[in-house]
Every structure is written in C-alpha cells, then in structure tokens.
Image (tube, helix red, strand yellow):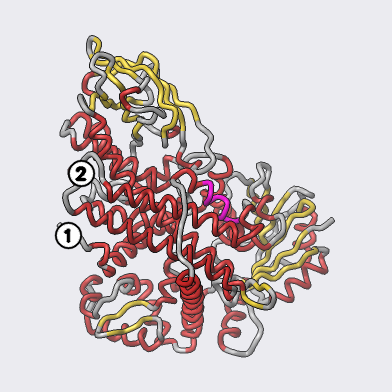
Amino acid sequence: MTALGAEHDGERLDGLAAEVQRRFGRFVREWVNPGADARDRTGEPLPRALLAEAGRLGLPGFSLPPEIGGQGRDRFEWGIVLEEVSRISRDAGLSPVLDVSAGVAEVLVRTGRAELIERYAVPMAAGACVCPPAAYESREPFEYRTTVREVAGGWRLDGSKPFVGGAVFADAFLVYAREEESGDILSFVVERGDDGVCVDRLPTTGLRSMGFGSVAMDRVRLPGERLVTGGDAVSAFNEYLGNRRLMTACSVVGHMRALFEECVLGLDGRQRGGRSVLELPNVQRTVGEMFTAVHTSRAIVHRALATTYGRRDRFFDPASTVAKEFAAEQAIKVGLAVMNLQGGEGYMRRHPWERYMRDALGLIGGQGAQELLLIQLGQHAALELRQGQVRMEKAQRTIAELTDGWWAFTVFASALEGGLLDQLRTPATAGEAAGRLDAPEPLVGEMLEVLAATGLVRSQGGRFAISDGLEAIMAGGPPRAGCLLDGGPGAPGEVLTGTLARQLDGLDDRLHRPDAHLLVAGTGSAEIAAELRRWLPAARVVATDPGGEVDDAGRFDLAWLHPAAERPCLDAVLRSLRVGGWAVQPASSVPGTDLRASVSRLRSVRLTGRAPLPDELARAMEEAGFGSIRIVPDPLDGTRHLVAGRRTR
C-alpha cells in the first residue's frame, strides 16, 4: 500500500506515463485515432474489434483483480492511465467506456458469486463483453418507474432507461429498478438478447462514439441468479459512482492537457501588428488562465487519487466529487478560451476546437482565476511550449546530423531498436538500464556516454534520461532507425487529415464527404491506399500501379502521387480530379552541398530513381495545368515537402 503523497511522486507519475506510451500508445495511434474524426461525423460507436484489441493488450483489465484475468493495479495507477490515454487519444469516448466497464466488473466481483463473475466479469476484463450501468431516469431512485417484482422462477422487469452510455454496442446492462412490494432498489444483469429488451440509438451533441442509447424493458423475465444486489443497491451504486466521478475527472484532465498544448503551439507564429500574438498581454493573460485551470485541476485530481489509499466513505466521497466538479468547470472554461483565441477556426469542423467543446459538454461544466500572476503564467507557459518545440527540432537536427558520424548513428540506431531509449524515459543508471534489458553493463554504459555527447540523452549524477526534445519526438511514436536511414514518408493518412486538411482550401470537407473518392498512383500504392482507408473509412480509395491507366475523368477529390510521377501521369491525374480536387506529391530532396542535403538526394535516387526538388515538382504541376500550387513543409521532417496542386477549372 502506498501512503498519501503519491500525487507528489514525480518519478512514479513519469513512469506510469511512460508505461502507457509503451503498452498502449501504439494501440491508440493505430486503432483509435485513425477513425476518430469519422466516428464523430457519422455518430458511429467504437468498434467492438477495437475494444477486443484493448482487451488483448490488458487495458480494460488494468485495475481489475488477477482472479478474473486483470492485473490488480490500484486506483491511483488506473486514474493516471486514463489521464494519459485521454491525452494521446483523439476519441473522447474511449476512456469513459473503458472505465464504465471496469467499474461494473468490480461491482460484480464484489458479489462473490461465481455465476456472475464467470459469465460477465471475466469476459469484461478481457474486452470481450460490454456491460454498462443503466440507472439514470431523471428522477430520484425511490421514484424509479422501472420496477421489478418477484415471480415464479425469478423476476419480472418493466420500464425504461432513457440515457445509457455504450447501449448501442453493449452485450448486457446492470439495471437498477424499484421493487414494487418493498420500494427498495435492486440491481440485475439484463442481457441484450433477453425477450422484451429493446435498445434504440440516441443521437448526442458530443461523445458520439460512446454509443448512447435508450433501453426499454417490457415484461422481461430474469432467472434468480441475475440478481446482483438484493437490497439497498443505491449504496452500492454510490460507491461505484464515487469511483466513476474520479476517473471521469482523470479523463477530463488528460483531454484538457492535450487541448492546451495544441492551442498554444497553434498560435505560435501568428502575427498581429508585426508582433507574435503570444507577446500580446491579453493573449498572455488568457494563456495564463488556461495554464492555471489545467494544472490546478490536475493537482486536485491527483490528490483525490491519492486518497484512494486511505479510508473512504462508501456512500459519498468528497475528494472525488470536488475533483469532478472542479475539473468540469475548468474544462468548459478552457474550451471557451480556446474558441476565443482561435477566432474563426474555433467554429470550423476541420480543427479540433469545436469538437472538444461538444465532447466537454457531455462530460462536464466551467469557470475562474487571478490578474497579474495570470499574465506572468501566460508568459511562462508560452515560453515553455515554444522552448519545447525548439528542443524537439534540435533533437531532430541532431538525429539527421548523426549521419556525419557513423559510430554515433549506429549507437543511436541500436539504442532505438534495442529499447534502451524507452528505458530512459525515466532516469536510470547504466546498471539499471542494463538490468532491464538483460544486456552487459559495460556496453550499455559506453552507449550512454556516446548518446550523452550528442545531447540526445542527458546525464546528471550518474543517471541518464532522454532529452526533452527527443522525448517530445518519441511521444508521437518512437521513430524507427530504418526510417531515419531511408527517409521513408510518414503516414499519408495522418498528413492528409492533419497538416494538409488545414492548409489546402476545401480539402477537409472533400475528404469527409459521403461520396469522397481518393486516388493513389505509383509504386507502393496498395500500402498507402490501405493506410488512407484506416484514416478515412467512409472514402472510396482506388490504387493504381506506376503503369496503370487513370481514365476516370472528374471522379476523384484527391490524388496522392508517387514522387517520381512524370508529365503523362500528371496529365491523366488532372483529368481524373473533380473541379476543386487536389493532387499531392511528396518530395524528399533538398538543395545544397551539405551532407544532409546530399544524403536526401541520394536517398531519393535510391528509392525512386530520381531526385526532384520541391520547386521542380511545383513547376511540373503548373505546366501540366494545375493551379493554386503549394509547397508545404513537413513539420516533423526537415528534408521532406509536400507539393500540392488543384484542378481549378
């Protein structure tokens, strides 16, 4: 058992955040994020295959007891996991669904009844069963219109629950009902397939992937073993509710952190009257208010998590309630501030701001802060975020420049692929890192000294940790050494729905139209097409090989071209685009005589047979008849640019 004060253990918090990145980061980036925008637009719930994959990785069972297949981690750790998962996830519905399932599984485990545990709790821990609570009726429990009465061989249930999260994809429900004879509140497991159960989809403003719905029950007959709590189920539900309030606050804090960072970095570089908007006192004041709201919310939530190690009131937990209420108010306040700072972009669907507000309204509500200190905090927060960006860019340059020293680059690549850099997310000595990797300590020590000399790893008091800049790069998914050597392109889906969708007029709406058509032409088109389908599941994606014919005139909204595509291909692609459609061609070569530029051109020749520069590709597009030519630098790769042209007539 850990004493109160766990919220101040920075090393432990960093270790849990690193564990989330290591165990669940790839799942969130590859399973959750690619379809998040599409689910929000269409109102589709989280896919069951996604929840099953989460179960395979141990996410739903993280805090559940080992007896049912869980890992037995405590509530403090589970709360931090939910916060970190929410911070990296683009789908605000994921964390609530995970915690609702874990909470109900705990209720079933506490009954001690094997028939309930084996049939429901065990598969819930594995992500194979979804069983949300069905309690809400917009009235006091003892006035429930959902009633139950004992009949021969079991129970009869009648009534409805108008608002149940996860109802659309649930297998069963933990239903709370008023017994007609005694007036007491009882709880039962009701399966979706029981006769008389009807589930209807419920459209909502936000949190659309949670699959909200109503559950109607007409003369539903239940066997006696489905009874979960045979008296005073309200008290048991209040204990569940206290935990849910706290874990909801953890998720809210994670989403607030991500929104704050993205907003401030989004403002960096904007100019007003010849000055950066981040230098304006009114903007600094607003950033200061947001900084205060986020960090105070986090401190309160972590303090509430620490109280789970001590005695808690089963019926009402004030620490959890304060955390939920305070985080709720601050989330709305932060959302409104972002809308004001982003101006017109705050109302555009292509940007994340308006969606955050809709999702926040499904979780929470807002307000509050102070004057002079707020301006100072705004200056501090903006400076820290900008320096973080500078450190990340410095780390990227250092990685690229390592090609000038093959021994250093080999050490870096080995540390990356061998997991040494992952171990350094939290400070460790050479001996500790070697022990975790089961590697010789002298070899690990020598590698750490080389990495420290490059600045990618910092050394203090005999302990080593990755630099802030490298940590920021690895937070988006650790780069692979092969990519660094070959200069392979990043994920086209993420580039299209992110950087390009925001910079190319009309592209965001075109990508998400019900009849959207995308063309991928050239070598590797099948792989890229599969990637685009993951990020844009509603779009029709067509792939052609380098010599393939493109004869569908006026059909496509976007074409992704191979870097070596020449004039005949450009002519055909232009004809295939709808008016207003865009063609995008990556260019990995940069001019210059320095080593980095030379390596970029050599890499392009090896991969594509040519080394066209971005300006050359832009001229070729213009000569082929494309308009609105743009050269968009990739913010995470200093040698790659994306050349875009539009069919304008």
Give the side of residue 470 with respect to residue 600, left or right.
left
- From the viewer's side, name the closer residue of 245 and 412: 245
Give the side of residue 66 with respect to residue 361, left or right.
left
Mark carried by residue 2: 1
The relative height of residue 127 versus residue 1 in the rendered view (above or below) is above
Tell me where residue 70 appears, x and y as whole percent.
Answer: 24, 47
Asked if residue 427 shows in the view, the reply is yes
What type of secondary structure mainly makes up the magenta span? helix
Tell me where residue 545 appears, x and y as whole percent.
Answer: 65, 57
The relative height of residue 506 versus residue 5 in the rendered view (above or below) is above
**Residue wearing tag 2:** 313
Query: Which residues are drawn in magenta?
Result: 351-358
Task: Let me know if residue 206 is in the magenta part.
Answer: no
The relative height of residue 393 versus residue 337 in the rendered view (above or below) is below
| Secondary structure of the residue carrying numbered label 1 | loop
Label 2 environment density (alpha carbons within 10 Å; few <14, some 14–19, many ≥20): few
Task: Let me know if residue 356 is in the magenta part.
Answer: yes
Task: Look at the image and tell me in which quarter the N terminus lies.
Answer: bottom left
Kind of residue indicated by mark 1: Thr
Residue found 59% across the figure and 60% down from its top: 498
Label 1 environment density (alpha carbons within 10 Å; few <14, some 14–19, many ≥20): few
Tell me where residue 316 appears, x and y as whole percent.
Answer: 25, 42
Asked if residue 528 shows in the view, the reply is no
- From the viewer's side, name the closer residue of 394 and 351: 351
Marks 2/1 in contact by CB < 8 Å: the verdict is no
Picture quadrant where residue 219 is located:
top left
- From the viewer's side, name the closer residue of 25 and 434: 25
Give the side of residue 468 with respect to residue 628, left or right.
left
